[in-house]
Amino acid sequence: MLFPTIFGNLAIGPTAEETDERENASNDTASLDKLKATAIDMLPALKTVDVTAIYAGLRPATEQSDYIIKAHDDDNWITVAGIRSTGLTSSLGIAQHVAKLYAKHFGKLPKKPPAALWTPVANLAEHAIRPYMKGGEIICHCEWVTRSEIETAIQGPLPAGDLGGLKRRTRATMGRCQGFYCAAHVSAAFEKAKHGAS
Amino acid sequence: MEHHDIVIIGGGPAGLSTALALSQAGVKDIVVLEREAETGGIPRHCGHMGFAPYKNFGLMTGPNLARQLQDQTKHLDIRTATTALGFTLHGTLRVHSANGIIEISANKIILATGTRESSRAARLVGGNKLKGIMNTGELQQRVYLNGERPFKRPVIIGSEWVSYSTLLTCRHLQVKPVMMLTETSVNAAPSYFAYGARLLGTKVLQHAKLIAIHGKTTVEAIEIEQSGRIGMVDCDGVILTGRFRSEDALYSNGYLEHEDHAPKVTDSFKTSRPNIYAVGNVLGHLETAGRCMAQGRDLAKVLTP
């Protein structure tokens, strides 16, 4: 599948390969070549466009293809497992189903759930206001990530713990240069922000 | 809207030398837009010798050349921490500055946005996402600007001029690279550099391809292919050097005609739009800082006949 992302990139993929690996997500070089060739087949103009980023992840799976959703009366336990790639689409339905299972096996759910911990997540796409538009100091030039966005990412109840987390929160170093220009500055800004916060 | 005679995008060797030569030729209204906090461009973090303002190679270090350029252009209207975001449909520039986004128009706009190395993703190198994988640009900034020491036993991928710049950076770090690996026979740089590498104790492996990078959190080994055979090399870092790409954000959307990852220009640096010029490494060939500065002076002559 070739699709546009909200960040203005085009993405090609995904592929799905069975693996026994439980911790190590790894890109297979042959699959990368094949994906790029497929993208060029679909849209020949991509031939002269460099790939910006590649990634792989592990999806939890069980020995069966269907979901496993089951209440265990004796253990005070509800198993919700083996949710493959349809997880996002089905998440609301699964939640309703699990709530019903709970009511059936363990009694009424409390009317008002305890307050959730919210981690503020900044807008990263161009359709709405981003800090650079107000004049913030840009640290990552490909993705126009400002110092204030880096500072915000390490605040709140679930702060970004390392550079990997910071990248995922802010998109810093995730653009076309992949850190050639800015990675050292992003690291320094991250360390400085952490010292400021502690 | 702000209007100027000349707006130069990029305050590296090409942009600054264009600005300086134009100002010496009597042009008054020149603005240089530089997205970093200071001008000087890539030489700022090439802490070794080999730079010269008037020829390809000399005995200046990169930071010394950058400081000289900064001093010579102090009197000019140079806006640092100011990013050209893109062209508008009517040919003006959208510019990010400390006060927010402004629009600037100019009689002539000069692209001098420079170049960067290809990333791991662009090279389609598989394996894991790990600490310790970087371009020369990132390495040199970590070393010369931040004082970091990211690894002890890296592998250098490539054998272009910059690959040997990387070797000198490693030497400065007192780090001995495990090997240099190149897909061809030693290519863009002259072969005596390979002898230099061997003299510094680094093995040079030719006709070998990097297939994948393996490890848990940091680099542990690379997988390489040579004459159909696959092998593993232990290391704790991978420096991906060279395969330079023009910094194309302002024109890759088709605003300027381009091919082979560079804007099309005439011998007099004219792009496909009548009031837009391009100079220096944005043109796609990696040139020395001295050569980029010479191009800047040539462009100034074109603009002030």
Image (cartoon, coloured by chain):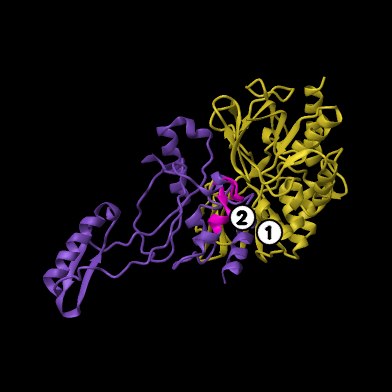
Chain colours: A purple, B yellow
Q: Amino acid at mark 2?
A: Ala
The quarter of the rendered structure image containing the C terminus of chain B is top right
SS type, badge 1: helix
Residue at 26% in and 62% down? A82
Q: Are marks 2 and 1 on the same chain?
A: no
Tell me which corner region of the image, top left, top right, bottom left or bottom right, holds residue B147. bottom right
Do labels 2 and 1 touch, CB within 8 Å? yes
Q: Amino acid at mark 1?
A: Arg
Write the start and end of the magenta stretch as one range. A135-150
Task: Name the side, left or right, on which A46 lies relative to B21.
Answer: left
Report x, y in % for residue A125: 46, 45
Chain where mark 2 sits: A
Tell me which corner region of the image, top left, top right, bottom left or bottom right, holds residue B155. bottom right
Report x, y in % for residue B70: 81, 45
Tell me which corner region of the image, top left, top right, bottom left or bottom right, holds residue B297. top right
State the residue lying farthest toward the left.
A104
User: Residue A11 has which mark?
Assistant: none
Badge 2, how many Cα within 10 Å: few under 14, some, many 20+? many
Give yes or no for residue B215 being in the magenta stretch. no
Residue at 23% in and 68% down? A112
Badge 1, how many Cα within 10 Å: few under 14, some, many 20+? many
Report x, y in % for residue A104: 11, 70
The quarter of the rendered structure image containing the N terminus of chain B is top right
Residue B113 visible to an observer of this rendering: yes
How far apart in space, not on screen, are marks 2 and 1 (Cα)? 8 Å
The residue indicated by pointer 2 is A183
Task: Name the side, left or right, on which A150 lies relative to A3.
Answer: right
Q: Is residue A162 above or below residue B35?
A: below
User: Residue B142 has which mark?
Assistant: 1
Report x, y in % for residue B174: 76, 65
- Between A49 and A26, the one nearer to me in the picture: A49
SS type, badge 2: helix
